[in-house]
Image: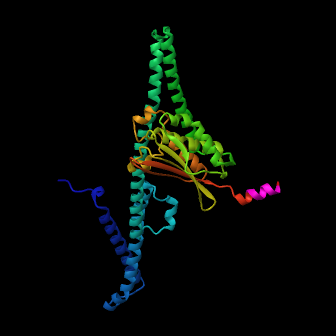
Amino acid sequence: MSSPNKSSTRPSYRFALRSSIFIVLIVLLMMVALQLFGATFKVWHFGVMLPGIFIICFLVIQYRVQKFIYRRIKKIYEDVSLLESTNFADREIATDMRTLTRQVEQFARNKKIEIETLKVREAYRKEFLGNISHELKTPLFTVQGYIDTLIEGAHKDKAIRKKYLARAQKGVERLTYIVNDMDMITKLEIGDMNLEKTDFDIVELVRQTFDQFEMKAAKKSISLVFDMVYSKPIMVHADQERIQQVISNLLVNSIKYGKPNGTTEVAIEDLINNKIILRVTDNGEGIDKTYIPRLFERFFRVDRTGSRREGGSGLGLAIVKHIVEAHQERIYVDSELGIGSEFSFTLEKVNSIKKAKEAASS
């Protein structure tokens, strides 16, 4: 059996051996120096020399420990990029093992959190790619199917040709909705969409949106109503076009998941700090509590089949959230399965006193 070579010797043994050699050499040099100056050694001389030997041992070991640990810990720090190498000159990391332990433990915790975050993002990325693939694939295959049928000879029948072209057009419209909504949400996410804020009557805007979806709601016998009679305007400061889009998306969802002969109610209430809150409440299907945290994710659908039959891009609530947050406002959701849902968001209210003064001065 071969003897262990130098590389297999434990670093701590080599460290102790070298440190001992340094101490012995220094003590010998001191003794030789004393001999050269004619000093003679007696027993009590060693008692006098002991403090000096202790100080020398302390300094040698401290210096050796400093260098020994420093080189190895520096290598660890550089490997894990925990600290920049330029920071080591001012840090007492060589002998402060408790601090080092805390730093390494903190590093390990941070890396664990980072790895878990990356896993969640990777899962989200895969789900997102799967969702967008499905959303685009469905209308594409629909359009392709009708066009292929027409090319194969169905175009000769005028009635079939008209019906298939109308269905293909719906598929193209679905693709257009998806592309436009994705373009909008991308601009909102990167902050590339400028808001054109003005003062407008939120009550009148809701009425206009009711008129826009009155026929859609009538097909399911759903009533679009206010919670009370609003005889006076309620002025808010926001981007009117974007806020109408928010209200439209919330109403469309309410109609889509509403029960026949149901009701969608809009309420506008005052809040503190010159804010109003607009609530859209329905008595429809409701949403399971487990799904609520994911409602505003892109392409997330509670009902994976029924909602697709209803159409839409699957980006409506994600756009709603981004528009509201672009206004520096908050959006809330409260729902109970089988009872109904309520979506609400805040807006900045125009100061009535300020408006009165402006009107008087004009």
Left or right for 9, reference 121: left
Q: Nearer the viewer, residue 77 or 48?
A: 77
Q: Horizontal and vertical percent for residue 214? A: 56, 37
Tell me where residue 319 appears, x and y as whole percent. Answer: 54, 43
Magenta segment's dominant SS is helix
Which residue occupies the extreme bottom position in the image?
A: 44
Front one among 201 and 199: 201
User: Residue 44: percent from the left, percent from the top?
Assistant: 33, 91
Closer-to-camera residue (115/82)? 115
Mark yes or no: residue 194 visible: no
What residue lies at 39% left-to-right and 75% top-to-bottom?
Answer: 26
Residue 25 shows in the view: yes
Q: Quadrant of residue 247?
A: top right
Using the image as rendered, state which of residue 138 and residue 209 is in the foreground. Answer: 209
Q: Position of residue 160 (x, y in %)?
A: 47, 13
Quadrant occupied by the C terminus: bottom right
Q: Is residue 38 above or below residue 104?
A: below
Q: Please name the residue shown 34% across and 74% down the image.
A: 24
Magenta residues? 355-361
Q: Residue at x 34, y 66 (%)?
A: 15
Measured along the vertical axis of the image, is residue 117 above or below residue 50? above
Magenta span includes 59: no
The image shows residue 109, relative to residue 121, as above or below, that is below
